[in-house]
Amino acid sequence: MRVAIAGAGSVGRSIATELSDSGHEVLLIDRNSRAIDVDELPRVEWLLADACELSSLEDARLADFDAVVAASSDDKVNLVVSLLAKTEFGVPRVIARINDPSNEWLFTDAWGVDVAVSPPRLIAALVDDQAGVNEAGDASALLSLPETDLLEFTLPPGTPHAGHPVRDLVLRLPANIVLVAVVREGQVRAPSPETVLSTGDDLVFLSSAESVDELGELLAPSA
């Protein structure tokens, strides 16, 4: 799958790392030259350009991509990128980051957004939503998005992944399931490939898979 990511900040780079490690072709777009670090992500393509400019997206050949992720820290930018990706280039799947929860109502298909992800809402769901509270070893849906779910899984005692880096887990994830956050002692962190997992970590996944049974089997304690 070819994926273009607008915004090469910490969020955009983390997503690029996950996707490239999973074998996807990734293009990171950012207008700030200081955000571009070819050595950090050698398997990722980089484009120094303004993703809100139609000509920039034409240069990127956005119509050839399977998905676009609008991951900048500016909601206005993410909305413009989403709209251009969908209406001008017909990108099949557009995922947008919401930075300010008060703007959540804007992130709909009217702006070309197929899936909107709000980190503040996600964190609130982890803390507040009783539907997301689970026994260790059970995956549960935190909130549903169109054709996509956010899932939480607490690493139980005896899991084979404790003491191992995130990159080892990512390589074994089922198709259409992506790790988007690791929550430890109430602190949310991007899933860096070098992050070492521990028993009790809450892992948050974005899934468009029809079944998550395989994920539960992967994370369950060793027999």
Image (cartoon, rainbow, N blue to C red):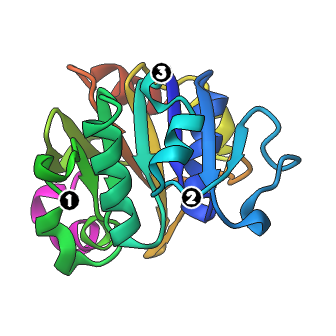
Give the image location of residue 61, x and y in percent: 53, 29
Q: Mark 3: give few (<14), some (14-19) or many (20+) Cα within 10 Å.
A: few
What is the number of the mark on residue 133? Answer: 1
Camera-near label (1 vs 2) is 2
Q: Mark 1: give few (<14), some (14-19) or many (20+) Cα within 10 Å.
A: some
Q: Mark 1: which amino acid?
A: Val
Give the image location of residue 6, x and y in percent: 51, 52
Q: Residue 107 appears in which quarter of the rendering? A: bottom left
Q: Mark 3: which amino acid?
A: Asp
Contact (Cβ within 8 Å) of mark 3 with mark 1: no
Mark 1 and mark 2: Cα distance apart in space: 41 Å
Is 110 located above or below residue 119 in the figure? above
Q: What residue occupies the far front of the structure in this picture?
A: 55
Which residue corresponds to mark 2? Answer: 50
Left or right, 17 with reference to 141: right
What is the number of the mark on residue 174? Answer: none
Which residue corresponds to mark 3? Answer: 64
Give the image location of residue 104, x and y in percent: 17, 68
Residue at 61% of width from left, 64% of height from top?
A: 9
Q: Answer with mark 3 or mark 2, whichever residue precedes in sequence.
A: 2
Magenta highlight range: 124-134
State yes or no: residue 180 in magenta.
Answer: no
Left or right, 6 with reference to 16: left
Camera-near label (3 vs 1) is 3
Q: Mark 2: which amino acid?
A: Asp
Residue at 43% of width from left, 76% of height from top?
A: 186
Is 35 located above or below residue 206 in the figure? below
